Image (cartoon, grey):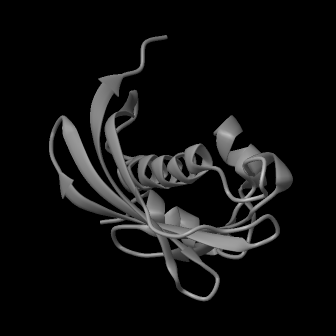
Amino acid sequence: MTNGLDALRPLIGQTTANSPSPLGRWLNGTLQEVGENGIKIAYVVRAEMTNPVGILHGGMVATLLDDIMGMTIMVKYSADLSGYFFSTVNLHVDYLASAREGATVIASSNITKAGNKIMNAEGWLHDSGGKLLAHSTSNLLKVEIRA
């Protein structure tokens, strides 16, 4: 069975500049990997992503993780979900370490359970050396897109 993840594979190494998501375009990550249940995207920490002391803002960490988990679900199930979107019901983030402006961080995701109405996902944020910066879990609700 093919899915949207198969369509992403040729885009490995490209940026998210052509993402259908305005936020995805602004984040401007580079697709690194596409696996059966998840993807990996690298981001350079820009000044506008940091707090006053130049560290990646906690809200930004949550945004990166929320975005990659939602993207993974939408892309993997795109053929089955025409007319639907998954909205975050909850997002739990454990902040374990920090990254400074100019650093590269890598967000990755995995779908842990695919239900009919609720999807469960997990996300990680690492630095370029592999150090775990944050871990997250989320439940996302399937909602119909109304024109």
Q: Estimate the x, y position of residue 35 in percent, counting from the top left.
A: 42, 75
Q: Estimate the x, y position of residue 92 in percent, counting from the top left.
A: 33, 48
Is there any visible trace of residue 142 in the rendered image?
yes
Please state which of residues 11 and 32 is positioned toward the viewer in this rendering: 32
Q: Estimate the x, y position of residue 113 in percent, counting from the top left.
A: 18, 56
Residue 4, above or below 128? above
Counting labels gives: 0
Residue 142, above or below 126? above
Looking at the image, residue 24 sits to the left or right of residue 113; the answer is right
The residue furthest front is 53
Residue in the picture at 15% in, 39% down: 116
Residue in the picture at 47% in, 47% down: 66
Q: Estimate the x, y position of residue 89 in percent, counting from the top left.
A: 30, 32
Query: For residue 21, what is the image quadrant?
Result: top right
Residue in the picture at 81% in, 57% down: 46
Residue in the picture at 28% in, 32% down: 142
Please state which of residues 103 and 64 is positioned toward the viewer in this rendering: 103
Looking at the image, residue 146 sits to the left or right of residue 55; the answer is left
Query: For residue 54, what is the image quadrant?
Result: bottom right
The quarter of the rendered structure image containing the N terminus is bottom left
The residue furthest bottom is 129
Is there any visible trace of residue 20 in the rendered image?
no
